[in-house]
Image (spheres, rainbow, N blue to C red):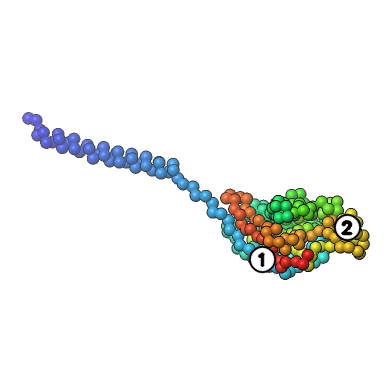
Amino acid sequence: MKPPRRWRRSGRRAVSPIIGTILLLAITIVAGVILWSFKIYTPAASPSVTFLIRSGGSNPVWGDPTDESGGGAYSLMNTTQIIVATHTPTNIPLDEIYLTFVCDNQSTGGNETILLSGTLANMTWIPGVSGGSSGVAPVGAPTLGWCASLKIGGYGNGAVSTAYNRLAIFTPISASQTTLLANGDTFILYIHQGGYPIDYSGGGDCAGGHGTEPCLDGDDYHGAPPWCFTTQGACTIYLSYVGDPTTLLATIPVFSLAPPTSG
């Protein structure tokens, strides 16, 4: 006697849920592989730095071997300090922060020249203090170029007369931490208030002789030229992060860093 037909139909129905479960599991696994394969990588956040400007101070300015006083001597000069107030992230390398001092020669229709360009890490050497009084800047230290029509670098045929320290110095807040940016790190910019830096000594830079007509002190020229403080837009400092992602940290008009001079 044959079993009722309904039992055979019931057996076919029992297989269907099993096949459905297997198919659903396979679809779930494939979907999981697709989701994993299309994992989204978010880019690193751009660094951020804020600065405090402190004007009206003075700091030592050092000579070099072309000076009568030699490499270890110094005198005081007016300065403006650009101080790191806050920064994120905490591990920004100093060798990935570039400082560029740009001059815009507006008398020639806006021809831009670069007075200084280098990393903060390469601007911490102080003549007569860092590594003795030899007056020789370390390898990699940036040098000075043109600011509008004035070529500061190269005057006087001095061995280090073009070193960055004629214009500015970067001083980390801690002598033991000179590789990463820290709050309190300070960029010191030398400025001229009251006119041009002058030289009465004659020699190769000043043809007027001794004690007569003042002239631009080419050999010992320190600081930003006076027109940076008398003409808006003439000089600008850019601070840039060159890591990933590259970021412009600050644009600082030099005109705003000191009261206008009379020069």
Q: Name which residue lies at 79% across and 56% down.
A: 131
Quadrant in which residue 225 is drawn: bottom right
Q: Residue at 70% across / 58% down in the picture?
A: 234
Q: Which residue is the extreme one toward the top?
A: 1
| Extreme residue in the right direction | 210
| Side of 212 relative to 85 (left or right) | right
x, y percent for residue 39 = 45, 45
Given residues 204 and 58, the one toward you in this image is: 204
Which mark is first along the chain, 2 or 1? 1
Amino acid type of the residue tagged 2 in the rendering: Cys
Instruction: Count neighbours of disc 2 (C-alpha within 10 A) and say few if under 14, some if 14 to 19, many if 20 or more.
Output: some
In-image side of 203 versus 42 (left or right)? right
Identify the residue at image location x=66%, y=60%. 253
Q: Quadrant of residue 37?
A: top left
Look at the image and tell me whether residue 144 can be seen.
Answer: no
Q: Residues within 10 Å of mark 1 (few under 14, many from 20)?
A: some
Q: Which residue is mark 1?
A: 53
Callout 2: SS: loop
Residue at 75 percent of width and 54 percent of height: 147
**Residue bearing mark 2:** 206
Q: Amino acid at mark 1?
A: Ile
Q: Position of residue 22 (x, y in %)?
A: 29, 39
Which quadrant is home to the C terminus?
A: bottom right
x and y percentages locating residue 160 in the rendered image: 82, 53
Residue 139: mark in rendering: none
User: Marks 1 and 2, Cα distance to the nearest angstrom?
Assistant: 35 Å
- Residue 90 placement, left or right of 24: right
